[in-house]
Amino acid sequence: MPVELAKPAEIFDRDVEWAELVRFATDDRPGATLGVVSGRRRQGKTLLLYELARATEGFYFGATEATPADSLRRLGEALGRHTDAPGPLHLADWSSAVDALLALGRDRPLTVVIDEFPYLARASRDLPSVIQHALTPGRAERTGSRTRLLLCGSALSFMGGLLAGSAPLRGRAGLELPVAPLDYRAAATFWGIGDPSLAAQVFAIVGGTPAYRREYVQDDTPDGPDDFDNWVVRAVLNPARPLFREARYLLAEDPDLRDTALYHSVLSAVAEGNGTRGGIAGYIGRKANDLQHPLTVLEDAGLLTREPDPLRSGRSRYRIAEPLITFYQAVMRPAWTALEQRRGADVWRRSQRRYASAVLGPAFEEIVRQWALRFAAPETLGGIVAEASAAVLTDPSSRTSLELDLVAFGEPPFGDGPRPLLAIGEVKWGRTLGVADVDRLVKARDLLVTRPSLDARGARLLLASGAGFTDDLRAASRRRSDVILVDPTRLYTGD
């Protein structure tokens, strides 16, 4: 019977993550077990794990950058306090330290959290192997323990490799929990923003990172749509606020990102709309073959996302995964000196077009794709969406390309057969969409119907706009069941 522990009021959302952690921590079966928790910084991992340890009367240890001897000393002191020992425990090496952690769970399931585990493992390269040995099946220290050991880290490249391939801990973990940023709807609720258009504008800058509201702007939120510009100047472009330098720190904090100038250039290229490898190479003046390593490192660090084009085999585009980095590259980096001189209001006035085209437009497109994946009702798009992305469609007759902001696929058929294409879409934040946009999508659908690998005959035509729709288009949507209109209100409250 699963044990239920009420989620602390301090933790917003994260119901799924809390439930998984409680299930793992309260498992009553004999034998020590291992869990891995990962996610970019500022997502609330530490709060989750600290509150879990407190709720289960477990042990929490936050690692720091230190020598192995210093880390062992600090861990021994923490264990001494936890066990009410007369003094610190002497831990000769990591083998004895891990066994001491396993000993904590001799009498009952006991949560043991090692936060910022990469700090320890980078200083002691054999630590994952030590843990692997400690958790060897049949080993007395493991079988006699019910310690629920949770390793947590923010270095995604390191944490991703912890359980991969031939890594020592491969196959040892009973929990692998990523803590992702809040989705756009949850972020609006967290920021207390009820206006859908305003919520989209704020999300395009700060995304779904919880700490940006609490610690980084001290709960300063826009007081309505008319306050948005002032909020950007006082909270984001203000050198006195921590959010001002956060995008730079996101790169500097990851030890795998050594050539920061190159990585900034790559991210700048993507923020300017150069999403292909060739486009990035041309923008920064490098050969496309030279970009394999930096692109892979940025992907592993969770800062870039590579999205294959579902309509062109072997083609893909890169997208910046953290909205604040896109905003920094497009708006802040080109005017950094002026911003440091506290001329944020002037910079923001000059940056309106860049913000709309390079930041808000792409963010709105991604919001629409997430709506199709997570919130759109099956009857809206004619089925359950399994994949949603942007794509480029080639017209063989005219040798031209049509860019589609949304292609939404249903679940692959069982066995052979064409894959259902549920919807194709046009998404524009600042342009009023009309009947001409429907005609363009009809042309694209006609081209897709001819592809034997797709079943596109019933594909809906989705038009999403932050600026609205013409009366003719609204009338057409009432006459035609295949035309779907989506505005910010529907994105945030409807299906």
Image: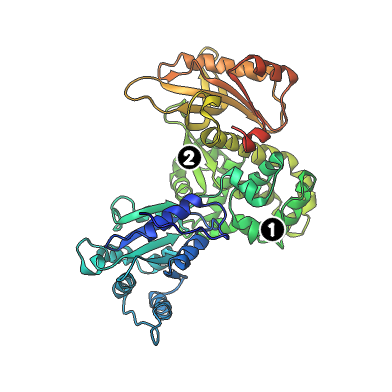
Specify the label residue 306 is tagged with: 2
User: Residue 437, can we see it?
Assistant: yes
Q: Quadrant of the C terminus?
A: top right
Label 1 amino acid? Asp
Q: In the image, residue 256 lies at what x, y percent?
A: 46, 57
Task: Determine the residue located farthest toward the front in the rendered image.
Answer: 1
Going by the image, does 130 lie left or right of 485?
left
> Does 240 sit above or below residue 467?
below
Going by the image, does 322 lie left or right of 312?
right
Q: How is colour applied across the structure in the image?
A: rainbow
Closest to the observer, 310 or 487: 487
Label 2 amino acid? Arg
Specify the label residue 433 is tagged with: none
Find the distance from the CA under tag 2 to the CA under tag 1.
33 Å
Q: In which quarter of the image is the N terminus?
A: bottom left
Give the tally of numbered discs. Answer: 2
Q: Is mark 1 on a helix, strand or loop?
A: loop
> Does 431 sit above or below residue 219?
above
Q: What element carries label 2?
A: strand
Reading the image, the residue beneath label 1 is: 219
Going by the image, does 434 lie left or right of 315?
right
